[in-house]
Structure formats: structure tokens, C-alpha cells
Image (cartoon, helix red, strand yellow):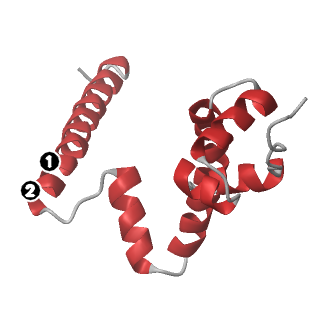
Amino acid sequence: MARGRPRKEIDRSQFEGLCKLQCTLEEIAGWFDCSEDTIERWCSREYKQKFAEIYAEKRQAGRISLRRAQFRLAEKNAAMAIFLGKNYLGQSDDPSKREREQAPEEKLSDILDTIQDALTAEDGKTDGTS
């Protein structure tokens, strides 16, 4: 009885490494010199899940590595520090946005002043000076 061609050998650690690098299905298939369908079938056999599910899981480690590298770079590179500040801290070069960002702090300062005034007035009442 004739059998089909032998299964393509796909190295699991290489596959996961390519996912971490955010490689596409097409690129991964190209790396292993096979079709995208072969990768899909291999994922079904190896992981009991579809490629998209495995890819979504495995690429997270790559994102973590990239984020770690960006933060290290930000310690030495002002442009990266600015980029991260804008994207993670909501900082902006737009003066109108800076004014809006400062507004809550000004409100907080006013609230703290009001509380301090109230506490000072209370201290005066308890000292018998009022």
C-alpha cells in the first residue's frame, strides 16, 4: 500500500522562537520550507490547537522581551524615554494637553489647601481660642 510523503519535521523550539519574534504564518512556513497548511496541521497535532491560538500565546513572550529591551534603551536614549513616556504615561508635547494634565493637580492642591484651612480652624476651636 502506497503512503503519502513523510511528515515535515518542525522543530518546536524554533517554531516558538519564530512566534516570539512575531513572524507571520507565511514567514514561519517559509522558514521550515513547507506550506502554511502544513504548519496549521502540525499545530493541531503538536498542541491540539489552531495556529492562531498558539501564536497568540507564544508571541506574548516576544512582547515582554521587546518591552524589556525598550526600557533598558530608555535609560540611555532620550528619544526612547520620550516615546515610552507618551505611550505608557500619557505624556504629550502638545501644550494644551499639558495644561489639561495639570488641571487635576491644581484641583488637588486646592482641595488640600481647603482641608488644611479646615484643620487649622478646628485646632483653633479645640484650643479654646474661638
The C terminus: image quadrant: top left
Q: Say what amino acid the circle numbered 1 marks.
A: Arg
Residue of label 2: 96
Q: Considering the numbered disc 2 on the image, is that residue within a helix, a strand or a loop? A: helix
Q: Residues within 10 Å of mark 2 (few under 14, many from 20)?
A: few
Q: Considering the numbered disc 1 on the image, is that residue within a helix, a strand or a loop? A: helix
Q: Residues within 10 Å of mark 1 (few under 14, many from 20)?
A: few
- State the residue in front, 97 or 88: 88
Residue of label 1: 100
Determine whether label 1 and label 2 are within 8 Å by CB.
yes
- State the residue in front, 126 or 27: 27
Image position of 36 (left or right of 42): left
On screen, residue 43 above or below 102:
above
Where residue 120 sits: x, y (%)?
Answer: 30, 31
Question: Which residue is located at x 32 percent, y 58 percent?
Answer: 86
Residue 99, quarter of the rendered image: bottom left
The N terminus: image quadrant: top right
